[in-house]
Image (cartoon, rainbow, N blue to C red):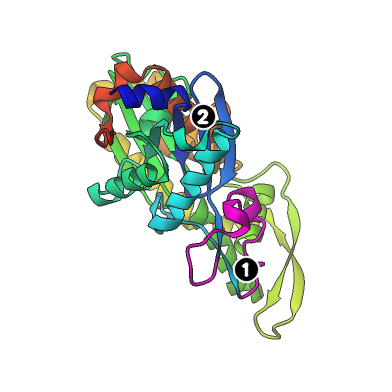
């Protein structure tokens, strides 16, 4: 206990939104201090991170699809869970060092609150706990992403009324109805932003015989992607490799084509939302007629997403303020009230 107190003097307690696409870190009293892609560049065949352990995040994402044979850019999380344990540990260790830059390295042992998808298994939860411990955390707490997103979006989750959140991330979509500081109904589906990117890539292969990288697919989604018809349809020039000739080529793609490509993943998200509503208690469903649905996560920024959910459910759907940071801001609230909330969170045991 004494050693824990000493280590706490040199450490900043951290909240982490450990996302498939991006990792956001907040520090108690400072808010969000880091927002970087969940990507790590390593020497091929090893787990050794490039550039003295600094080829993580933005630096590594720039390498995706462009690395020589000796280097691999890895996204260590897939579908919201850890796919590569060692690389995730290296990534978390880098983020902890970056937050504590300039402090005594031997004493960086923060308490960490990590948001995880509600649908992950006990084994997957243990992998997150172990990765954070080995990366340098003194104590690790896990919170469910829908709760963190709801709190970060400013919903009255502690009140006896229904609050509904749809958090569309990179690897998972979390749909939850909350009341009295807990989740009453929840569904987690491993269909989200990455699946939208893959759907766009598959459409270009199928329709234009054009192969594109994941960064290009993401740009198409952000720039001209939509879930519902736009007032003015958009077009975009796309460059890639011709599947027949093998040579570089470019083509023009329109927003209505992208919308066609996105029908399947968007349909899966809509189905998850309607299934969750069907499982709600009648009194909670009645509350939602007035309270509506709040959208969070990067996928919620897809043009027209709120419109298609409103049409599918008949409920008012709105975008949260700064949806990309809702989960991270929720972990910050947990940090600020750790003594109050810690009994509700899964935790490892003190290591010291």
Q: Is residue 231 covered in magenta?
A: no
**Residue at x 36%, y 49% (from the top left corner):** 189
Q: CA distance from mark 2 to mark 1?
A: 38 Å
Foreground residue, 222 or 4?
A: 4
Label 2: element kind: strand
Give the left or right position of residue 220, taking residue 206 as reference: right
Image quarter (top left, top right, bottom left or bottom right) of the C terminus: top left
**Residue at x 53%, y 71% (from the top left corner):** 44
Residue 108: x %, y % from top left? 46, 34
Q: Is residue 48 covered in magenta?
A: yes
Label 2: which residue? Answer: 26
Question: If you read the primary sequence from the N terminus, does the residue marked by circle 2 or circle 1 appear first?
Answer: 2
**Badge count:** 2
Viewer can see residue 163? yes
Label 1: element kind: helix
Image quarter (top left, top right, bottom left or bottom right) of the N terminus: top left
Label 1: which residue? Answer: 204
Q: Main secondary structure of the magenta part?
A: loop
Q: Local crowd at mark 2 within 10 Å, few (<14), some, or many (≥20)? A: many
- Residue 111: quadrant of the picture: top left
Location of residue 264 with respect to 273 vertically, above or below: below
Residue 187: x %, y % from top left? 31, 41
Q: Local crowd at mark 1 within 10 Å, few (<14), some, or many (≥20)? A: many
**Residue at x 61%, y 47% (from the top left corner):** 226
The tag on residue 262 is none
Foreground residue, 39 or 181?
A: 39
**Residue at x 39%, y 23% (from the top left corner):** 6
Residue 45: x %, y % from top left? 49, 72
Foreground residue, 206 or 218?
A: 218
Q: Which residues are magenta?
A: 43-69
């Amino acid at each position: 206990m004494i050693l824990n107190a000493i280590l706490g003097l040199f450490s900043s307690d951290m909240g982490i939104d450990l996302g498939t696409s991006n990792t956001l870190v907040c520090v108690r009293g400072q808010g969000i201090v880091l927002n970087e892609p969940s990507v790590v560049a390593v020497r091929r065949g090893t787990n050794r991170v490039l550039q003295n352990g600094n080829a993580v995040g933005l630096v590594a994402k720039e390498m995706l699809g462009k690395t020589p044979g000796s280097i691999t850019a890895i996204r260590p999380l897939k579908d919201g869970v850890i796919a590569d344990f060692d690389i995730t540990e290296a990534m978390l260790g880098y983020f902890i060092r970056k937050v504590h830059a300039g402090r005594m390295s031997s004493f960086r042992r923060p308490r960490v609150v990590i948001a995880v998808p509600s649908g992950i298994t006990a084994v997957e939860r243990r992998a997150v706990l172990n990765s954070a411990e080995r990366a340098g955390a003194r104590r690790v707490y896990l919170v469910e992403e829908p709760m963190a997103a709801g709190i970060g979006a400013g919903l009255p989750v502690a009140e006896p009324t229904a609050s509904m959140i749809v958090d569309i991330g990179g690897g998972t979509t979390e749909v939850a109805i909350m009341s009295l500081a807990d989740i009453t109904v929840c569904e987690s589906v491993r269909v989200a932003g990455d699946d939208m990117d893959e759907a766009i890539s598959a459409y270009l292969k199928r329709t234009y015989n054009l192969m594109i990288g994941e960064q290009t697919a993401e740009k198409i989604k952000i720039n001209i992607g939509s879930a519902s018809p736009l007032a003015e349809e958009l077009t975009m020039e796309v460059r890639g490799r011709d599947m027949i000739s093998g040579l570089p080529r470019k083509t023009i793609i329109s927003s209505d084509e992208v919308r066609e490509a996105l029908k399947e993943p968007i349909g899966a998200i809509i189905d998850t939302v309607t299934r969750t509503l069907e499982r709600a208690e009648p009194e909670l469903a009645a509350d939602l007629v007035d309270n509506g649905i709040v959208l969070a996560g990067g996928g919620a920024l897809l043009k027209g997403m709120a419109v298609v959910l409103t049409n599918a459910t008949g409920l008012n759907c709105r975008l949260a303020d700064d949806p990309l940071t809702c989960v991270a801001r929720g972990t910050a609230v947990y940090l600020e009230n750790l003594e109050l909330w810690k009994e509700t969170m899964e935790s490892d045991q003190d290591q010291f």
